[in-house]
Image (tube, helix red, strand yellow):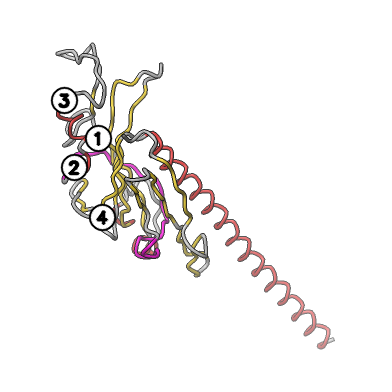
Amino acid sequence: MLIAMGLLGIILMLIMNWQMSTLSISTRTNALTRSLNDLNDLTGYVGDRVRSAVRVRVATSGLSINGKACTADNPCLAVVLPEPRSDGEIRKYNLFVYRMDPRSEANTDFVTTDSWATTNVAVLNEHRSEDSASSIVNCVIYDPTAVPPVARTTFEASASSSCTAMRNLASQTTLTGFGKYLVADYLARASDLPAAQQPFAYSAASKELTLNFRDKQRVRGTTTFLPASGPFTMTVQARNVP
């Protein structure tokens, strides 16, 4: 009887260990699947922005956004984008700046509480120029209802100070008053990536931007990176940049 009970106890322990192991594997698999989907969404979103951009700049120095410097650890991608109306007409261009920020700088309304992530991962924030108050306001190329009206022109020909500043994106040093929005969470920091595979790399000669992102999370006590072998890479053509 005692032997049978002992054997039953061993069998129950093995079943419990198997269930726990299966649960752990399932949890990690689900987390990895979500992470891969997030990386696909992120590169697709930023890639679409770059394809539409009329100006592109990658900055690791010489530029700050809302008082935060663009550095090697916190690189920035700046793009000037047309804003089509519902009828497809373009009357305005906006400046967007994407910065790899420490998670501690994310808007707490947009991220879950995670003390480990706060000090170990990065987020990608999108900063947008505004119609007023930002240091470079949106570039308006046609607005018949404005006072005074803005006569129809083009982005390249407009003499307005905002359009001129956006055309000279490479010479801008300080941007303030931009709205901030979260694009992606749980990203590996730039310092976690190989030196030759930083988040943003732009070639003015080929007009190609290479994106390198890697997911970083802690699942059941284990720090995981996805992809495991290195960053998820996408190269896009800034086809509208002159």
Real-space Cα distance between discs 3 and 4? 28 Å
User: Tag 3: Cα neighbours inside 10 Å, few (<14), some, or many (≥20)?
Assistant: few
Real-space Cα distance between discs 2 and 1? 9 Å
Q: Label for residue 129?
A: 1
Question: Above or below — where is 81 with respect to 116?
Answer: above
Indicate the quadrant where residue 154 lies: top left
In the depicted view, which residue is nearer to us: 53 or 86?
53
Upstream in sequence: badge 2 or badge 3: 3
Disc 3 element = loop
User: Tag 1: Cα neighbours inside 10 Å, few (<14), some, or many (≥20)?
Assistant: many
User: Tag 2: Cα neighbours inside 10 Å, few (<14), some, or many (≥20)?
Assistant: some
Residue tagged 4: 60
Upstream in sequence: badge 3 or badge 1: 1
Residue tagged 3: 160
Upstream in sequence: badge 2 or badge 1: 1
Residue tagged 2: 175
Real-space Cα distance between discs 2 and 3? 17 Å
Disc 1 element = loop
**Nearest to viewer (mark 4 / mark 1):** 4
Q: Mark 1 and mark 2 in contact (Cβ < 8 Å)?
A: yes
Question: Above or below — where is 222 with respect to 156?
Answer: below
Disc 2 element = strand
Residue visible at 36% across and 18% down in the picture: 89
Rendering coords of residue 12 (x, y %): 74, 75
Q: Label for residue 217?
A: none
Task: State left or right for residue 20 relative to residue 49.
Answer: right
**Amino acid type assigned to the residue bearing label 4 in the image:** Thr
Q: Which residues are magenta?
A: 174-196
